[in-house]
Image (spheres, rainbow, N blue to C red):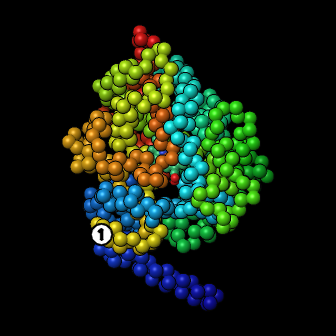
Amino acid sequence: MLLTLFLILIILVFYVAHMRHCYKFFERLGIDGPRPTFFLGNVADFAVTKRISISIQNWTKQFGRIYGYFEGHTPVLVVSDPDILENIFLKHFSKFHSRRQFPLEDRSTSRGVHLFSATGDEWRRQRSIINPTFSPLKIKRMIPMITDCISNLVAKIEDCIQNDSAEFDISKLYKSLTMDLIWRCCFGMKTDMQSNPNNPYLIRSQQVFARENSTYLTTLLGIFIPELQPCWLTIHHWLNTIKSKLRTFLPMADRFIADDPSEWLKENVDHFIRKTSDSSEEVNLLQLMLNAVQKKFNQTDENATADQRILSLNEVKQNIFLFMIAGYETASTALSYVTHVLATHPEEQKKLREHIDMFIDKDTILTYEILNQMQYLDWFIRETLRMYPVTPIIINRQCSEEIYLPGLGCIPAGTKITLDMYNLHYDNDLWGPIDTKVFYPERFATKRHPLAWVAFGAGPRNCVGMRFALAEIKIAIIHLLQNYTVAPSCSSTVNQDLELVELVTIAPKEVPIRLERRMLERY
Ligand code: HEM
């Protein structure tokens, strides 16, 4: 008993000494920041603001373009100076190829690692296999499939108009649409999720982004004592296994015990691999990945270099899960923001509609070439994402070796660096002369700093699905404005801001709008 207490005491003394050492990190670099509160670091502030991005914005106002804060005792550097960011994301990418590890993110290669979490050569190898899926040529071939799914969206909107007197929350329809699109274009499967909101994959994917996720405790432990990450992961897996067994063997247990949505999705991706052979459409992401699977491939094989276009089956499974969730919530949220802007900016809506009408009439078959000519539509979406970024907190890098960066100094290996996307996107020096609080798509006509707009990240590790996301958003908006005029719901006013919920993405809780059918003299 005494020995156990003594051991605990020793561990505590070491832990406190280690924390004091960590808390001197920014002092050594000569960088200021909010004072940490012992065990919590600056995490308590997140509980007050309820949104990490708000805390970051507040700190940027207080400490400027370079400062540091602590998650538990982990130091995180926040940089919003575009020149320093250009060095990190572009010029010195070879030393900043990794992202920081999220709590409970499993990077053990035995279960396979997906593109988002992969580092170094592993990332390069996966990215070289996945990149071609989103080449301009492949997107061009996807346009008929995207258009087909979006025609279903218009049919669903018509149902809503008939049932709910033209006023409804359009964000729900967008979620089913973007899931439909991912399955169709990336996995080669027609699902019609838009007609089946109870599809278990759709529901689980939504739950991954929901707050009522049962992983809070292990996540918090992972933030406060990251050194014991393998231990928290094991506890997390065990808890999930126990829950899953209880759900299987106890009658009605599934009513009271929820499964972990991420684990459920990962366990059920075999379904895709079985089904993909039925697919008759274009070569898609899943087929490209399966082609890259070599049965004898073993992660520990020293010959598996970044240049070899091979994947393990576990990596394919992890990536199916990744694309299901990465491509669905982000694109539907972006669509929701664009629709909100349309509803609240009638003049800009009129201008965008006239622009669309100039390129497309009832006989036009929409092609990728036409889409690329529609510059104002492109600016409109980029300006929306400037003002309403979807994923401001996921863009970060971790350096793999010590490096000297002008303006920052000598950064030790392992330093975690993030950016304040709001500060960059609302910086009048980068975006003027028109005030950045004004919605003004034409500001994109002027060439800006390469790190001024980071809605899809920056550098070689930016969003791999950007072209696909922009194509689907553009085609959805074209169909929307060809058929309807978008107006705010009667219960909200033109100037009313959206209620936002932040987790991995920052998404509106709902987007209530009214749609008035257009007088279709042109169509
Ligand atoms: C408007 C919609 C979207 C936004 C705003 C968005 C944003 C982002 C951002 C900010 C990153 C991190 C980039 C960085 O660290 O520099 C990212 C990465 C990623 N995104 Fe997207 N994304 C969107 C749509 C999509 C879609 C539709 C897909 C899939 C089809 C996708 C798949 C990915 C993947 C796999 C990564 C990791 C790339 C890597 O690490 O190499 N995203 N995205």
Outermost right residue: 249
Residue named by callout 1: 32
Number of residues whose C-alpha sits closer than 10 Å to that of mark 1, classed few (under 14), some (14–19) or many (20 or more): some
Where is the N terminus found, in terms of image quarters?
bottom right
Taking the spot 40% from the left edge, 21% from the top edge, the residue there is: 359
Q: Nearer the viewer, residue 370 or 218?
A: 370
User: Is residue 484 in view from this perspective?
Assistant: no
Q: Nearer the viewer, residue 420 or 13?
A: 420
Q: Quadrant of residue 179?
A: top right
Side of 128 where 459 appears, left or right: left
Q: Where in the figure is residue 503, as x and y percent of width and height?
A: 48, 51
Residue 453 in sight? yes
**Which residue occupies 71% across, 39% down?**
276
Q: Residue at x 45, y 65 (%)?
A: 95
Q: Position of residue 321 (x, y in %)?
A: 62, 48
Residue type (three-letter) at the residue carrying disc 1: Asp
Q: Residue at x 30, y 63 (%)?
A: 66
455 or 496, nearer to the observer = 455
Label 1: element kind: loop
Position of 262 with respect to 431 (left or right) is right
Relative height, residue 322 to residue 175 (above, below): below
